[in-house]
Image (cartoon, grey):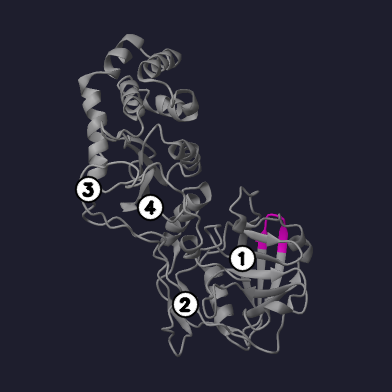
Amino acid sequence: MRKFSPLILVLVAIFMAGCLSRKEAALPTQTPLPTVVLDIPAASDDFSTNSGCTVVAVKPTPGPTPESAFPLITASDWSRGPEDAPITLIEYSDFQCPYCAQLAPIMERLSAEFPTELRIVFRHFPLIGTPEQPFHENSALAAQAAEAAGKQGLFWEMHDVLFSRQAEWTDLAGEDFQVWLVAIAAELKLDVAQFTTDLTSQELVDFAQNAWISGGQLGLDSTPSLIFNGKVWPSNVPMDHFSLWAVIQLTLLEKRQFYACPEMAIDPTAQYIATLETEKGNIVLELYPDVAPLAVNSFIFLAQNGWFDGITFHRVLPGFVAQAGDPSSTGYGGPGYAFRNEISPDVTFDGPGVLAMANAGADSNGSQFFITYAAASQLDGSYTIFGHVLSGMDVLESLTARDPSTNADLPPGDLILKVTIEQR
């Protein structure tokens, strides 16, 4: 079964336009800002003659550089999540931008899904435009309203209302919008008199204008703009939940990856039995060390290092295959190394229960594996077969169907609790 390289996220992603391009509104003077792409190379051809394996650097995004083009996070920033989170997402946003409103519930969902791993920082980039060429005419006052609420400790509450009820105010004239904001302040139980004073204070008027200017000077040309661990989120990668979730998962996976190929430690003449203890029962496999020593050696190495513990069958296509081996559950994760295909005419996809390596093309085998539900002769010659099911096909048949390639909300995958290896 093909395991798509994470690079596919870049190559086939549908562009999600922002609220502004350089052609649509006049921007303040900009300083050049290099953008980045997802750095997820395919497996190298530099295989060791002896090992048939090579290290593959799998990094879904570059880490922060010592010198960042973006201001450091300070106590004046509005943020959710722990300060020591391994992943920081800075969002430059405009409350009047409809794409920003679409992103807001996604960011809230990610915060709930990664409570200790993710910090989200909100920064204003109101697309004010110029007197001669205004763009979002209510964006400045909306930013001022959030800051005025923030002075009373309710920034995020105002943030949520501005986005969730954007349709109510985006077309209001300035004075009508101000009346609307004061009514919202009362709903939030703010000190309305103080809020009204702060809303149009020179301090906050200047704040909104400076946010517009500084965003342009940073090279931002659209909203929302995301900074992922210090680097610009590529414009050709969607800001949908799946894409953000997947890159977060893959970034977190780096801590578990290996940076050397496993040493050959198996006996090709021995019999190896692997038991997949799942939450729905056991699946017992016989491995083929004589047919596919690289695959069997890697599988045993990963099992003994706990790689498979607690991961899911992330892809289950009834009548075809059940796939696992990726702790990120995205379908893109691997162990940090890749090894050659091992194709033998002695074993084929001739029925149910065939155990094989998933790959992203020839010689890119890592940790993902699949088991067939039926014969699949179309796979012969392209995938390394390294075992078969001795018992537990009924467990395999009971797995929850799910296909992450649809990028849709999926039911939870069934867990592999542990993989144990017995040598006979």
Where disc 4 sits, the SS reads loop
Front position in the image: 291 or 26: 26
Q: Circle 4 sits on which residue?
A: 233
Distance from disc 4 to disc 1, alpha carbons, whole Å, reads 37 Å
Viewport quadrant of the C terminus:
bottom right
Q: Circle 2 sits on which residue?
A: 262
Front position in the image: 377 or 338: 377
Distance from disc 2 to disc 4, alpha carbons, whole Å, reads 34 Å
Where disc 2 sits, the SS reads loop
Distance from disc 3 to disc 4, alpha carbons, whole Å, reads 18 Å
Residue beneath the point at 54% across and 72% down: 360
Where disc 3 sits, the SS reads loop
| N-terminal label among 4 and 1 | 4
Please, what is the three-letter code of the amino acid marked with disc 3?
Answer: Gln
| N-terminal label among 3 and 2 | 3
What is the crowding at mark 3: few (fewer than 14 residues within 10 Å), some, or many (at least 20)? Answer: some
Residue beneath the point at 58% across and 56% down: 310
Please, what is the three-letter code of the amino acid marked with disc 4?
Answer: Trp
Mark 3 or 1, closer to the camera: 3
Q: Position of residue 405 (x, y in %)?
A: 60, 59
Indicate which disc residue 419 carries: 1
| N-terminal label among 1 and 2 | 2
The quarter of the displayed image where residue 383 is located: bottom right
Mark 3 or 2, closer to the camera: 3
Mark 2 or 4, closer to the camera: 4
Q: Which residues are magenta?
A: 277-282
Q: Circle 3 sits on which residue?
A: 30
Where disc 1 sits, the SS reads strand
Distance from disc 1 to disc 2, alpha carbons, whole Å, reads 18 Å
